[in-house]
Image (spheres, rainbow, N blue to C red):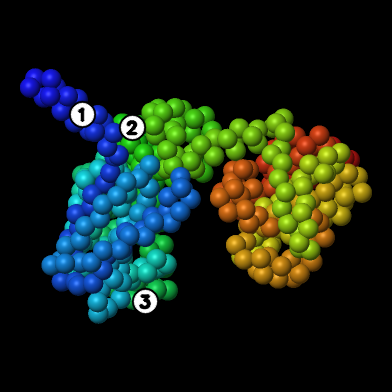
């Protein structure tokens, strides 16, 4: 009998160890009948997941398993009305979602949003809730009492009824409280970074940190990234930070420029390394970017001045629609190599750490990075390298 009991215990232990991690989402949404849809993109399997269940007595339930932590959406499809959605992080943990249908508001881009959504369970959703509360905790300090009261008044919806007047009044408010605005921003950023460091084993912390990377130096990015545990460093939500570190290291002066192949207006492939032997300006722009279009005459002057001395310009459009790029190219009469960066998920702009446009880089004749430069810096550097 003892042998049988021990065998059963061992079998249960094996079964328990072999069970696949899973999630369970218990959802509640009062006053609605219809369906609930759980949607997320699984980049590991490269597939879109859509799971639909019925809402019964104001409740719905999802079960499943994920290989990593991903952003997800729960969309409520009422039987008699327009859909609305709420966001959460899908992770292998028991989760509870409480949605208040009376809080539905029209979103700017993503349709109707359930603004009052309580997500409980899982370390990532717990982190997100606490992280989102940081700005209010800063504003709640006694020293910001007057500023907070005034800002709350300015943020009331009725203040925006007359938009032109609101912008004028808000501008005056910002001028009057400039020091408070700056102080709150600095304290909030400092508190957020400290909270990220304190939660180095939470995947969502890496995603929140990625929102800082366009405004801080490589040294700080690497220092904070190295605080994360290996699990977080290698998770999906850390990919943007990893890509940024790789890109910033790649574009250091003296390093070989990252090679790429993109399409020309004629539909032909063009490869950057084919220009070895020439100085090259990479000009990242877009049809919708006013400053980019305004800079075109200056770039044309540089091109005309130095093209016979060994300079080539490669324009790289960040447009999402090829027709917009072609129309703008025709309007601007661009005389240099003109390409479009449409490699979804593997964009050249990402490889060159481009967060703002226009952005221009200069490459030397060996294809090495000289550096990121503004128009006047390019002019001075080309004069130094190629003469008047």
Residue visible at 23% across and 49% down in the picture: 24
For mark 2, give the secondary structure.
Answer: loop
Residue 100 got which mark?
Answer: none
Q: Quadrant of residue 86?
A: bottom left
Q: Nearer the viewer, mark 2 or mark 1?
A: 1
Circle 1 residue: 11
Q: Position of residue 186 (x, y in %)?
A: 38, 41
Q: Nearer the viewer, mark 3 or mark 1?
A: 1
Quadrant in which the C terminus appears:
top right
Query: Can the viewer see residue 366?
Result: yes
Q: Position of residue 199 (x, y in %)?
A: 31, 33
Residue visible at 24% across and 33% down in the picture: 15
For mark 3, give the secondary structure.
Answer: loop
Closer to the N terminus: mark 2 or mark 1?
1
Q: Position of residue 108 (x, y in %)?
A: 40, 68
Closer to the N terminus: mark 2 or mark 3?
3
Closer to the N terminus: mark 3 or mark 1?
1
Within-10-Å neighbours for mark 1: few <14, some 14–19, many 20+: few
Nearest the camera: 246 or 24? 24
Q: CA distance from mark 2 to mark 3?
A: 47 Å
Nearest the camera: 176 or 158? 158
Within-10-Å neighbours for mark 2: few <14, some 14–19, many 20+: some
Q: Is residue 245 left or right of residue 170?
A: right
Nearest the camera: 226 or 284? 226
Circle 3 residue: 162
Nearest the camera: 316 or 69? 69
Circle 2 residue: 201
Q: Is residue 28 left or right of residue 233?
A: left
Q: Quadrant of residue 255?
A: top right
For mark 1, give the secondary structure.
Answer: helix
């Amino acid at each position: 009998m003892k042998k049988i009991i021990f065998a059963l215990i061992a079998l249960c232990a094996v079964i328990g160890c072999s069970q696949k991690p899973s999630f369970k989402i218990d959802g509640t949404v009062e006053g609605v009948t219809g369906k609930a849809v759980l949607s997320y993109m699984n980049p590991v399997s490269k597939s879109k997941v859509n799971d639909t269940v019925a809402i019964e007595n104001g409740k719905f339930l999802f079960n499943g398993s994920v290989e990593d932590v991903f952003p997800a959406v729960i969309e409520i499809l009422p039987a008699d009305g327009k859909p609305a959605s709420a966001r959460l992080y899908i992770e292998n943990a028991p989760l509870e979602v409480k949605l208040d249908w009376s809080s539905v508001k029209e979103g700017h881009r993503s349709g109707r949003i359930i603004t009052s959504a309580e997500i409980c369970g899982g370390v990532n959703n717990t982190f997100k809730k606490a992280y989102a509360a940081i700005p209010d905790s800063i504003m709640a300090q006694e020293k910001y009492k007057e500023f907070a009261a005034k800002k709350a008044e300015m943020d009331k919806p009725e203040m925006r009824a007359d938009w032109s007047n609101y912008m004028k009044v808000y501008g005056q408010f910002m001028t009057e409280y400039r020091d408070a605005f700056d102080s709150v921003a600095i304290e909030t950023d400092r508190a957020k970074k400290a909270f990220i460091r304190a939660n180095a084993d939470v995947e969502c912390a890496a995603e929140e940190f990625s929102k800082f990377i366009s405004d801080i130096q490589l040294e700080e990015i690497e220092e904070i990234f190295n605080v994360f545990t290996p699990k977080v460093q290698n998770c999906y939500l850390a990919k943007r930070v990893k890509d940024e570190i790789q890109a910033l290291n790649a574009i250091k002066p003296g390093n070989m420029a990252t090679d790429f192949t993109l399409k020309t207006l004629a539909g032909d492939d063009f490869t950057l390394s084919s220009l070895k032997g020439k100085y090259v300006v990479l000009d990242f722009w877009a049809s919708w970017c006013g400053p980019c279009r305004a800079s075109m005459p200056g770039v044309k002057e540089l091109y005309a001045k130095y093209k016979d001395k060994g300079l080539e310009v490669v324009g790289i459009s960040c447009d999402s629609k090829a027709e917009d790029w072609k129309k703008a190219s025709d309007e601007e009469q661009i005389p240099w190599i003109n390409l479009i960066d449409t490699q979804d998920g593997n964009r050249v702009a990402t490889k060159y750490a481009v967060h703002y446009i226009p952005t221009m880089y200069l490459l030397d004749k060996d294809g090495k990075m000289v550096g990121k430069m503004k128009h006047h810096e390019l002019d001075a550097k080309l004069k130094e390298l190629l003469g008047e």
